[in-house]
Every structure is written in structure tokens, then in C-alpha cells.
Amino acid sequence: MKRSVLTRYRVMAYVTGVLLVLLTFGMIGKYLLDMDGAADFTQMVSIAHGWLYVLYLVFAFDLGSKLKWPVKKQIWVLLAGTVPTAAFFVERRISRELEAAAAADAPATAGA
């Protein structure tokens, strides 16, 4: 697997996670605090999150298909972009798994 596949996924996980947290704050400001301008902010962030979440889905699916993940794991990663802050934790876990796998493969390929 190319490192760029993981990098694309990681970038989109962070972007999606940040936008979702911003959207959550916007919703709190709009509905609980009745803040001026929160409706416009929420609309702008929700549109951006919606479009970029689609890109996140494409990159996460690409990563999962290249790594031949089971369907359950693939769905777990895809849904991480819908729960505030979950994308950060899932991204970190996936990155650590792949770094550990790459480190385990490194000695085997170095000797060949």
C-alpha cells in the first residue's frame, strides 16, 4: 500500500472531524444559546462538512479496500465521520495499526 493512501485518509479524517465539531458548536449556539449569526455559520459549516464527508468516504473506502478490511471494520471507519470527535480517535487507531504493520514488515523486506 502506498503511503499517500493513508495520508489522504488522515487529512480527510481531521478535516471532517474539525468541521463536525464546529457544526456541533454552531448547533449549540443556534438552538440552545440563540446566538446571532449562528444560523448562517451552521448552514455554511454543514454544507462544507457534507461535501467533504463524501470525500472522506471515498478515501476511507479506498484505504479499506486496499487493505482488505472486513466489512464491519470498514463500516466502523466510514461512520466515524458522523460522530463528533470519533474521526480523531479512529484515525489515530488506524494509523497506529498500519505503522505497527509496516514496522513488522520492514525487517522482512530489508533482508530480502
Image: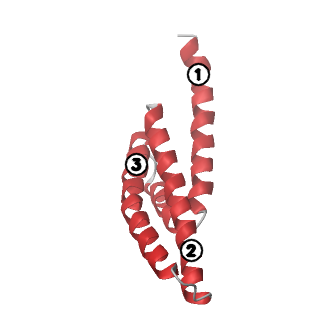
- The amino acid marked with disc number 1 is Ala
Q: Is residue 73 above or below residue 111?
A: below
In the picture as drawn, the residue positioned furthest to the top comes out as 112
Which disc is residue 47 wearing?
none
Q: Is residue 16 something that shows in the picture?
A: yes
In the picture as drawn, the residue positioned furthest to the front comes out as 36
- The amino acid marked with disc number 3 is Phe
Q: Compute the Cα span from label 2 to label 3.
A: 23 Å
Q: Is residue 99 above or below residue 43?
A: above
- Please state the horizontal and vertical placement of residue 1, each as a whole percent of the image: 44, 32
At mark 3, the secondary structure is helix
Q: Residue at x 45, y 55 (%)?
A: 74
Which disc is residue 106 wearing?
1
**Disc 2 designates what residue?**
24
Q: Earlier in the sequence, mark 3 or mark 1?
A: 3
Front-most of residues 68 and 55: 55
- Quarter occupied by residue 27: bottom right
Q: Which of labels 1 and 2 is toward the front? A: 2
Q: Is residue 61 above or below residue 50?
A: above
Q: Residue at x 40, y 56 (%)?
A: 57
**Disc 3 designates what residue?**
59
Q: Dot 3, crowdedness within 10 Å: few (<14), some or many (≥20)?
A: many
Left/right placement of residue 88 relative to residue 65 reads: right
- The amino acid marked with disc number 2 is Thr
Q: Residue at x 38, y 46 (%)?
A: 62
